[in-house]
């Protein structure tokens, strides 16, 4: 099949396999990513992962600060593009940009649309206890992930899998779909299917406070929450008035009827077990504020928590 002309939009590491896949089937005219951002205590400029890979591949990089002035859309039109591929770019594209390529802009979305439209589909799918997810290829319109779809790849979510681990798998699934399906889309061999918006769910942008653990919820719900918030923003609670991130946990049997949600039932050198609204949760690894990640036993031995304490109080 003849190679087609494309521009790639993307910023974080999730997009890298799709960038590589696009390079196998298309002539990449340019790579568009978000501007470099100050990072760390020294506020040194941090390059988006996609920019780093594009530079390694010798591809031109464009980092517009504004998309709605008309200048960027005019530049895109001048490239005589067949299609633009958008993977975790992180900004909403205005109508004139969406229309600039001959066949519009195609998005790799990390959910089975119309479920989990929005900025954080992987995190919310895990945190809400979903057992399956996938990636969808869609033609972008002016809505939030509302455009017609033309391919989907489904995969299970494993019981102990974190959002970070699932994201790595979905990035590869998305790349496979780009490699296998996008050339057929450009050739006109893919039918577009409208989404059923009555089935839509949302995956809003994450904030740090989304990581807060609500001990009145069930142990299984909190277990999913911890998995979903890993690696960012991290699930967290408090002990002795200080923030404690929870990196690992498991649901265990048993609960004292009189225990309060968040009450530490067992705290010894081997384990920490906490009462939930329903059931109990064993914390396996935590990170006390200002310290490294430790096992629950190390946390107890360091006097970070004791039996009878109520977490999150």
Image (tube, rainbow, N blue to C red):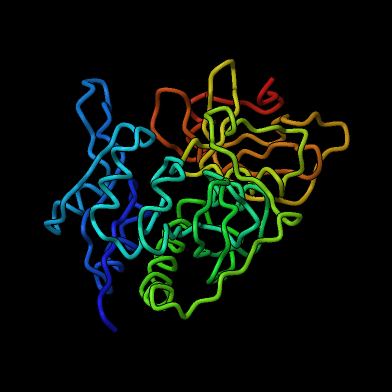
Q: Residue furthest right?
A: 257
Where is residue 79 drawn, in percent x and y?
23, 56
Q: Is residue 195 left or right of residue 96?
A: right
The picture quadrant where one finds residue 171 is bottom left
Q: Is residue 291 left or right of residue 247?
A: left
Where is residue 173 drawn, in percent x and y?
44, 68
Q: Is residue 9 left or right of residue 143?
A: left
Give the residue at x 49% y 65%.
137
Q: Is residue 139 left or right of residue 281?
A: left
Of residues 128 and 151, the one drawn nearer to the viewer in this rendering? 151
Where is residue 134 drawn, in percent x and y?
55, 65
Quadrant of the image for the C terminus? top right
Q: Residue furthest top?
A: 241
Of residues 274 and 79, the one drawn nearer to the viewer in this rendering? 79
Give the residue at x 41% y 64%.
103
Where is residue 53 drawn, in percent x and y?
20, 54
Give the residue at x 78% y 45%.
279
Of residues 59 and 83, the one drawn nearer to the viewer in this rendering? 83
Q: Is residue 53 above or below residue 18?
A: above
Q: How many marks?
A: 0
Give the residue at x 50% y 55%.
140
Quadrant of the image for the N terminus? bottom left
């Amino acid at each position: 099949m003849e190679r087609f002309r494309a521009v790639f939009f993307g910023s974080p590491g999730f997009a890298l396999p799709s960038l590589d896949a696009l390079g196998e089937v298309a002539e990449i005219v340019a790579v568009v990513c978000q501007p470099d951002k100050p990072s760390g205590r020294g506020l040194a400029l941090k390059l988006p992962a996609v920019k780093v890979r594009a530079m390694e591949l010798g591809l031109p990089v464009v980092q517009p600060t504004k998309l709605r002035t008309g200048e960027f859309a005019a530049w895109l039109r001048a490239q005589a593009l067949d299609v633009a591929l958008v993977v975790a770019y992180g900004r909403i594209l205005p109508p004139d940009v969406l229309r600039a390529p001959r066949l519009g802009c195609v998005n790799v979305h990390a959910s089975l649309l119309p479920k989990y439209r929005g900025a954080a589909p992987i995190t919310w799918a895990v945190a809400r206890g979903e057992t399956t997810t996938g990636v969808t290829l869609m033609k972008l319109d002016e809505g939030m992930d509302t455009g017609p779809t033309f391919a989907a790849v489904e995969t299970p979510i494993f019981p102990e899998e974190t959002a970070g681990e699932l994201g790595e798998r979905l990035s590869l699934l998305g790349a496979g779909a780009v490699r296998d399906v996008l050339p057929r889309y450009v050739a006109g061999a893919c039918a577009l299917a409208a989404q059923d918006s009555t089935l839509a769910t949302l995956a809003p942008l994450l904030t740090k406070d989304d990581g807060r653990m609500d001990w009145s919820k069930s142990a299984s719900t909190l277990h999913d929450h911890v998995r979903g918030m890993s690696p960012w923003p991290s699930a967290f609670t408090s002990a002795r008035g200080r923030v404690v991130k929870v990196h690992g946990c498991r649901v265990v049997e048993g609960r004292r009827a009189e225990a309060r949600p968040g009450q530490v039932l067992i705290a010894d050198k081997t384990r920490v077990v906490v009462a939930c609204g329903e059931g109990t949760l064993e914390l396996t690894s935590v990170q006390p504020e200002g310290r490294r990640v430790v096992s629950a036993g190390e946390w107890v031995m360091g006097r970070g928590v004791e039996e009878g304490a109520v977490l999150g109080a």
